[in-house]
Image: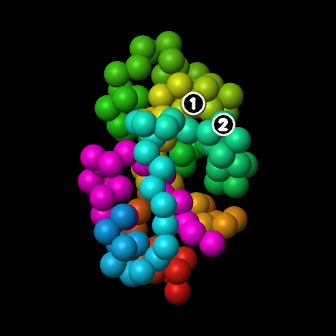
Amino acid sequence: MTATLYGIPNCDTVKKARTWLTDHDVAHTFHDYKKVGVDAQALDAWIAQVGWEPLLNRAGTTFRKLPDTDKADIDAAKARALMIAHPSTIKRPVLVDGDRIEVGFKPERYAALFA
């Protein structure tokens, strides 16, 4: 099975993850949020597995530029709606390999996943 890396191509962390996967001969495809968006079913599966909190990137530019009303009182439903409407608010990258999901990139975590 081929892993899928979700993110945006100009993100430095995504670039590092893509390079790591290529350098370690891990078969993968890249899903570009900017061009394709995020599939609601995929997002729901990620939320079910890891929770919405690790997925919502509150530190990113897109989130910070949202109106205060969008950033206030965030719960699971509101976070999901924000991530669907603004895929750049999803922490990057998200790596999906079968039933395994890794949010963010740390070389040691990828090494453990593909050991």
- Amino acid at circle 2: Ala
Mark closest to the chain's N terminus, 2 or 1: 2
Image quadrant where one finds the N terminus: bottom right
Query: 108 left or right of 98?
Result: left
Find out whether the residues at labels 2 and 1 contact each other: C-beta distance under 8 Å.
Answer: yes
Report crowding for label 1: few under 14, some 14 to 19, many 20 or more residues within 10 A (C-alpha). some
Is residue 47 at all visible to an observer of this figure? no
The numbered disc on residue 84 is 1
* Range covered by the magenta-colored residues: 1-17
| Residue located beneath label 2 in the image | 40
Q: Residue at x 27, y 46 (%)?
A: 10
Q: Quadrant of residue 106?
A: bottom left
The image shows residue 99, relative to residue 14, as above or below, that is: below
Report crowding for label 2: few under 14, some 14 to 19, many 20 or more residues within 10 A (C-alpha). few
Q: Nearer the viewer, residue 97 or 55?
A: 97
Query: 111 left or right of 20?
Result: right
The image shows residue 109, relative to residue 84, as above or below, that is: below
